[in-house]
Image: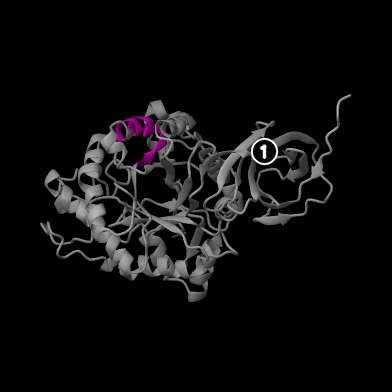
Amino acid sequence: MIACINMTILKVAVHETSAGGHRLSKIDTNIEKKATTSCKIKLDPENEYQTIIGFGGSFTESTAFLLNQLSKENKRKILHQYFSDDGARYSLTRTHINSCDFSLGNYSYAPVSGDKNLEHFTIERDQKWIIPVIKEALTISSKGFKIIASPWTAPPWMKNNKQWIGGKLLPKYYDTWARYFAKYLNAYSLEGVSIWGITIENEPLGNDNNWESMHFTPEEMSDFASKHLAPMLEKEVADKVQILGFDQNRDELKEWADRLYGDSSRNSTFDGLAVHWYASTYKIFSKELQYAHQLAPEKVIIQTEACVDAQVPRWKDDDWYWSKSATDWGWHWAPAEKKDLHTTYVPVFRYARDIIGCLNNWVSGWIDWNMVLNRQGGPNWAKNWCTAPVIVDEKEDEVYFTPLYYTISHFSKFIRPGAKRISLQISDNTLIATAVKNPDGRLVIVVLNQESSAKSFQIEIANQHTEVEISGKAIQTIEIQN
């Protein structure tokens, strides 16, 4: 006789954001299901993968400037919605060292040409906008958040072309540039802002000479990091800082992982690799992420930048963010052999798909780009207009929380630092999902339904189960109660 296993009911809390109007809304799981159950999601909490570092967005000068153009009430509201326990609970953020395209103009902390000893080094520019906003966010966040800092370029006088855009760091300034990082970290520390990690260069392959950039080959980056930067930080900076290599699109990750990790002395320098999503509007580059992890499983992979790029924001038009009408830079400018990677896309789906795909392929943290932009998609001195999760009309003191804000919140609010991704099997390939075990033992599943119709699915853990329905065109976070 075959013994019957008595299945007990799981207690769950479900939050949903949907094209139909839900915005991180709590869903009543006791109402009658409209869709028939055709899918099972099976969890194995004992089968653990990477540790989660966090989720969040970036403190750019553009974001900080805009927040200070708003009323105190709206500024506080936005920061509260990003960092408070009632909001998105951002836990991992990024900022820029020197200026970037999302600055009000070009600047560095060493404005005096030839100042090899950095006697005139100053972060005065950041003290006006960026640092006060970071400090205010820290007062709102109950658990604090980690910050990764990235340079777009060294001061032009350190480079072979003497320009903000393009060129390379002159070898005679390698030690000066390493000292520059140390001074930056110590100056921020004196302001009460701790920098958790740095990337050596944002997009070392360049950006077609459109805004601040500086080129490195993998070998040059490795030599600078191992022979100059790491020894300087060990000597001059009290706290350990994570050093991340690469910091560009995932399609190039394999080559950079090979070269940055290939030599034992270089391998020991890097704590992990940083990646961006701009190589495709739909492809995760799973093989590349898996390869980098298997090459150095003890090191982290962090997604440090993503956004709806080359696109002026749609103002108070939720439907646009749920429609397949967004394009990226590659829609117009990608080379012929890569055009197929840059199709039109649904912004909400791209965000949710990418975060889930990254988590399922060993990525430990995921950072969006600007937290706040205006209706033009700036300010941006290079006129590189982009979209952010929160759009403001600074002249009218109005704020628009786009569906992208709620999409990221499905991860950042419920998946906490220290969580472990766990094994998940799903029987319906039209649904995409990931699952984690939080430090408090609570299990969290995030599910994306890109179909127009609702779907009902059964969640199983050992001898426990429950049934949940997700709306059409929706993202859902399911917390399994202890």
Give, as a single range, the part of the protein colored magenta.
246-260
Residue 316, image quadrant: bottom right
As shown in the figure, which amino acid type bears the numbered disc 1? Leu
The structure residue drawn at horizontal position 26% and vertical position 37%, both measured from the top left corner, is 265
- How many neighbours does mark 1 have within 10 angstroms: few (below 14), some (14-19), or many (20 or more)? many
Q: Which residue is located at x 79 percent, y 40 percent?
A: 35
Q: Which residue is mark 1?
A: 43
Helix or strand or loop: what does disc 1 sit on?
A: strand
The percent position of residue 72, horizontal first and vertical second, equals 48, 75
Foreground residue, 263 or 63? 263
Residue nearer the viewer, 179 or 287:
179
Q: Toward which corner of the image does residue 452 lie, by quadrant?
A: top right
Residue 51 position within the rendered picture, expressed as x and y whole percent measured from the top left: 51, 45
The colour scheme is: one colour
Residue 347 in the magenta stretch? The answer is: no
Q: Is residue 335 left or right of residue 359?
A: left
Q: Residue furthest right?
A: 1
Q: Residue 6's spot in the image, x, y percent?
A: 84, 38
State which quarter of the image contains the N terminus.
top right
Predominant SS of the magenta segment: helix
In the figure, is residue 83 to the left or right of 466? left
Q: Is residue 130 above or below residue 174?
A: below
On the question of residue 209 being in view, the answer is yes
Q: Nearer the viewer, residue 8 or 155?
A: 8
